[in-house]
Amino acid sequence: MNWADFKTLDIRSRMLLAALLPLGLISTLLAVVFLQARFDDLQASYELRNRSVVRQLALASEYGLFAANRSQLSALAAGVIQETDVRWVGILDARGQALATAGRHDQSPPLTLDPVATHGFDAKRQLDWLVQPAYASALQLDDLFEKSTPSADQPPRLLGQVVVVFSRHTVDAQKRQVLLTGALIGALSLLFGMVLAAYLSRGVIRPIMRISQLIERIGRGDFASVQALRSQPTQRDPLHQLQANIYLMADRLAQVRQDQETQIALATQALREKKEEAEVANLSKSRFLAAASHDLRQPTHALGLFVARLAQLPHDVQTHALIGNLEASVRAMQNLLDGLLDISRLEARAVQVNKHPFALSGLLHQLQHDLGPKAADKGLRLRVRPTDLWMLSDATLIYRVLLNLVGNAVRYTEHGGVLVAVRHRPSAGQLLLQVWDSGVGIAPEHQQAVFAEFYQVANPARDRTKGLGLGLNIVQRTLALLGHPLSLRSVPGRGTCFSLSLPLASSQASAPLLAVPAPELASAGDDVRGQTVLVVEDDTLARAALVGLLESWGMRVLAAADAAQALACVAQPGASAPSVIVSDYRLPDEDDGMALVLRLRQQLGYPVPACLISGDTDPALIQRARSAGLTLLHKPVRPAKLRSLLRRLLQSSGMGAERS
Amino acid sequence: MAALRSFWLTLALLWLASVACAQGASGAAAPVLSAARVVIVSSDGALAYLEAARALTERLERSGVLPSDIATVLAADLPRRLANSALVPPQIYVALGSEATTALAAGSVRAPVLSALLPGSSFERILRSSGRSQSSRFTAIYLDQPLGRQLSLVRLALPQARRVGVLLGPDSANKAAALRALAAAHGLGLHEALVKAADDLPEAVLHMLADCEVFLALADPLVFNRSSIQNILLSSFRARIPMLAFSPAYVRAGSVLALYTTPQQTGSQAADLVLGVLQGKPLPAQGIEPNDFEVGVNPQVAQALGLAPDASALRQALRRQERLP
């Protein structure tokens, strides 16, 4: 375990370590000391016994050595070899000649004659050998003969020596036994100590753990479980006071939190009420706007139709000019209502995206054609850089975006020109369609806001000649629907650049025609002439205007103010069946155009083509009309658009040719 | 007038006597020594010398010699005494042990010297080393028993034994010839084994014991000493050959028999010779053999060997043979 690990030990481990480390050290130390002492005792007793055996043998061999009695010495050696641990016995005479040996000869030590007792040790084989010289034992005579001789004090005579080899195996085995026993006792006492320490330290650790748990729960804000813990009896707990204080703290915290929660709940409630109020206000505003828009559409619709009818009549030059101005005013009004309609359709996701590869050149050409004159009128130059690139998107929607962007550019530019350029980005698989102008530019702080509805930079007076402020909103919604990113760069006073990233497509053999219908009023000849049209319209003015316009196109018109009249009109015997139905959506008596068309078709017995006209821009209605397979025209209806629709309906049903 | 002169003379004599007495008191032993006619020189304070000296003194006193005529000194004190020319030389010195004999041989003593409690070989070695020769002026009572007495004891104690084994060392080799003759006279065969060096001893012992019926020990320091005696006794016992030794210590150590003279007996014999000298007779010119003796028996060993010698009976029988009282 290194120091870093030690530092991260939890409290339980530390307590146990503190209890066990001294215990382990002491028991180990004691075991070592006592084992060492025991080992020394064993070794000493082994050596003592060996020395004693050798001395005894030396004493016993004395006479045998004196008499060179080999048989007696052999018997002695044979006796000694029976002793424990004795491996080899040798008895040598004073000249170093072995008189008797016993035991295995390969365990005999090197034999040298020595006048003193010596010993040796063979560590490899764990053999001790002891050499004891055998002297003639001196007898105290104390007689006068001896006292009279000068050589009385001569040293005792060396008779020979005995050599005994002992093996340490037994004593080693005893030591191992002692070691084993000691280790066992040490381990048991350590184990006992551990259990005891664990048991005793539990008394301290448990309360600490409990407090730690408590604080953890408080930290989690789980005050309910804190209360549950509180009910546990802790009177005997050594940290009782600390726990009590923590419970106090928990109570305070819980109270503070409860207060906060109450305040937050109150504030949230207030906010929710405010939001609901705002939503209600917004809803009523929307309703008002929708209603106003609907109510506005009706007269504008009639006005447009009247003006169109009026324009078809012969007039003098002055009146003609007046009618021209009238038409322009009506167009502006219609544009405003169309913009609102577009936004409501985009909001309702009622716009169908039809992506396919198409060549940009056709689109740009159309753009030049549509907006070139308007720019030229302002003295600007609209330049469209030619390209042969193809892209994958919805051509109609992209064209509407371009119309808006370039229209805006022309509107906000007084000098210079407008440039539409395409940059190729093959590495990203994209092309960059850019609209540059040298106009007033947009300050950085307004660059986000310009995309909001009805937002116009520097037009607080809402001068309608400067547009309606819906264009960029429509652009943004359309591109979001298509999934194409749009970016804006602008320097106020220098100009603006809008960039569209569009996916590239490989060139196709033939370009599909742009679904933007070209104005074809001129060729509006005999296509609808003579056809019978059933007009259902509850508004008298609008009905009169529509009937007048349709009749001016040479159509036979059956007019009805409500569903009952329409059904009656069709049911009249001898009446010519209508080839096409143009019905207002909203009819009196809770009827609606869609149901009426179905009933009429049922009554007529064939699916007569029909279209609905509505001043209502409700997205739900748009969806329903689409799912019913009916074209929904929004008021104010442009006469040209209505005529084109009627022609298409008649052609597609085949009824037009048949009936005429 | 004559009475007055004799009175003054008496006074003067009394004064002289008192002065003499005062001088004697202050001179410690000097007055005693100065008067001694017999000086006993003891080698040391060993019990044997004390016993011998006591026996000698008692015997002399019983024969009328005054205690003041007998002085006892240790050998170590002898040179100082000899150097004191003020002393009147004694009539005889009795040396107890070889150290006392050596001290007296080294000093220039005019009185005859009787040495005792030492083997004949030791006495002869002292004579040789001091350049003296044995004479009536310098003689000794030997510790050794006469060979004949020993052989007689062999015959008495072990009547069946015919072959006597002896170990002859450098000191005892000179007795070989006499021994052979005496053995033959006693009707005994002799088996001699010669020990020239200590290493020869075991072989000699075993060789000798292999061919004898009784083992006669003759004092020789090379052969019989404190480290050899145990093994010699053991060898003899194992060979079941009874051993006749020359010292009571040997009987205690395991010898069956020993023939020896006690210090008291030696003291008494010396006292007889001292009395003769005091009466004007010279000492014998030759070495003196002990005239009294004891027979020692180790009954345990004897029993183990199947013998049952009676020590006092043997002593009496020997004395009868020698016609001793």
Image (cartoon, helix red, strand yellow):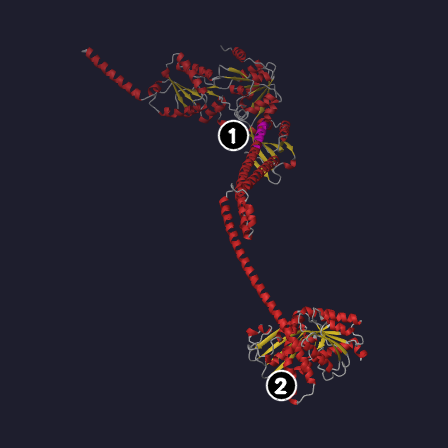
Q: Position of residue A154 (x, y in %)?
A: 51, 29
- Mark 1: secondary structure: loop
Name which of mark 2 and mark 1 comes first in the sequence.
1
Q: Chain of mark 1?
A: A
In the picture, the disc for residue A155 is 1
Q: Residue at x 81, y 78 (%)?
A: A658
Residue type pointed to by label 2: Asp
Q: Is residue B275 above or below residue A194?
A: above
Structural crowding at the residue carrying mark 1, measured as other residues with C-alpha within 10 Å and reported as few (<14), some (14–19) or many (≥20): few
Q: Is residue B110 above or below residue A90?
A: above
Q: Residue furthest right?
A: A658
Q: Is residue A56 magenta?
A: yes
Location of residue A457 (image quadrant): bottom right
Location of residue A438 (image quadrant): bottom right
Which residue occupies the foreground of this view, A212 or A445? A445
Q: Position of residue A575 (x, y in %)?
A: 79, 76
Which residue occupies the foreground of this view, A495 or B220? A495
Q: Position of residue B83 (x, y in %)?
A: 36, 25
Do we see residue B23 in this rendering?
A: yes
Q: Chain of mark 2?
A: A
Q: Residue at x 58, y 67 (%)?
A: A281
Q: Position of residue A541 (x, y in %)?
A: 68, 78
Which residue occupies the foreground of this view, A600 or A20? A600
Q: Which residue is mark 2?
A: A377
Residue type pointed to by label 1: Pro
Do we see residue A509 in this rendering?
A: no
Query: Would residue A347 appear left or right of B102 to someone viewing this image?
Result: right
Which residue occupies the foreground of this view, A646 or A271? A646
Which portion, as a residue range, is magenta?
A: A50-62
Q: Is residue B218 magenta?
A: no
Structural crowding at the residue carrying mark 2, measured as other residues with C-alpha within 10 Å and reported as few (<14), some (14–19) or many (≥20): few
Q: What quarter of the picture does the C terminus of chain A occupy?
A: bottom right
